[in-house]
Amino acid sequence: LPGKKVLIVYAHQEPKSLNGSLKNVTVEELSKQGCSVTVSDLYAMQFEPRATRNDIVGCLHNSEKFNYGVEVREAYKRGDLSSDVIEEQKKVQEADLLIFQFPLYWLSMPAIMKGWMDRVLVEGFAHQFPNCYNSGYLKNKLALFSFTTGGSQEMYTKGGISGDIRYALWPMQHGIMHYCGVKVLAPHICFAPESVSEEERKEMLLAWAQRLKTLWKEKPIDCSPEWYFK
Ligand code: FAD
Ligand code: ZN
């Protein structure tokens, strides 16, 4: 949809990876639609994933005993968060849609992306109890988790050896995005790209491009416990 703003948060070390190709397809397809697309290429940016004292510029709210959550909440109010965090928050604020593109690491996102969540989605900016879930501060935004796996689709079924892939999505989609008020579109999962033929990988990229063509018509998933665990 022309005019829509999209932020791609991308975590892969290798531009020639399938994740790199998926990211490129996203940029191309959405740009072609007239969307404005921004990419946070976390490894290329050498994004700092650690939540530390360095995230607060200047004096601490309580220098006797360090509490990261309290300190970043107060620093956010004063405009004293470190500049890399402020920059990411601006990108989030502007975006209508956040796309997270990554390889599955230990049934989760790579540490560098988890660090982005930890450091960017600060209390006061993204949420502040009781402003969470449907009243989180990032309501009216959409998120989509697009990732690749090592394991096959069969392994990731309910009765499969790894369990339903939806279990892994609970912390990301519900625990993080929904908590901040963001509505979630169905995830996009490319299973086991390393174990399939070149032809099948090309089809994976085509399928993603195809989905992007009608993405703005999609309805968010019902991001409640039933979606994951029923
Ligand atoms: P790549 O190896 O980069 O890509 C696969 C192939 O696609 C390559 O041969 C590449 O050349 C090719 N390709 C790239 N672009 C194109 C194109 N345009 N057209 C055709 N082919 C192309 N997996 C799990 O399932 N569960 C886990 O819990 C898990 N934990 C992990 C933890 C760690 C620390 C690590 C390192 C891996 C883990 N994995 C796990 C595996 C990981 O998820 C997969 O290795 C990863 O998802 C594969 O994606 P990739 O982009 O890195 O693949
Ligand atoms: Zn939810």
Image (cartoon, rainbow, N blue to C red):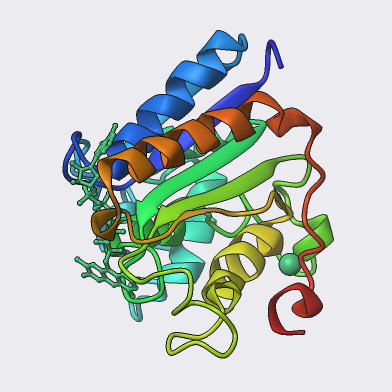
* Residue 99 falls left or right of residue 101: right
Q: Nearer the viewer, residue 68 or 195?
A: 195
Residue 185: image location, x then y, percent = 69, 49
Identify the residue at horizontal 77%, vertical 57% (top origin): 221
Picture layout, residue 139 above or below residue 51: above
Residue at point 67% right, 53% down? 186
Q: Quadrant of the C terminus?
A: bottom right
Q: Is residue 52 left or right of residue 219?
A: left
Depicted 122 relative to depicted 160: above or below = above
Q: Nearer the viewer, residue 23 or 95?
A: 23
Q: Which quadrant of the figure shows ligand 1? A: bottom left
- The part of the image, by quadrant, that contains residue 95 is top right
User: What residue appears at the point 68 percent right and 12 percent down from the top-left corner?
Assistant: 3
> For this rendering, which residue is in front, 99 or 49?
99
Q: Position of residue 192 (x, y in %)?
A: 34, 61
Q: Quadrant of the N terminus?
A: top right
Residue visible at 69% across and 11% down?
A: 2
Q: Is residue 121 above or below residue 105?
A: above
- In this image, 114 relative to 230: left or right? left
Is residue 86 visible to the viewer in this orientation of the structure?
no
Q: For this view, does 41 lie left or right of residue 95?
A: left
| Numbered circles on residues, count | 0
- Return the x and y of residue 23 as percentages of the image width and height: 38, 33
Check the image and report above or below for 121 versus 223.
Answer: above
Regarding residue 171, the answer to whether it shows in the image is: yes
Q: Which quarter of the figure has residue 25?
A: top left
Q: Whole-percent x and y of residue 139?
A: 77, 46
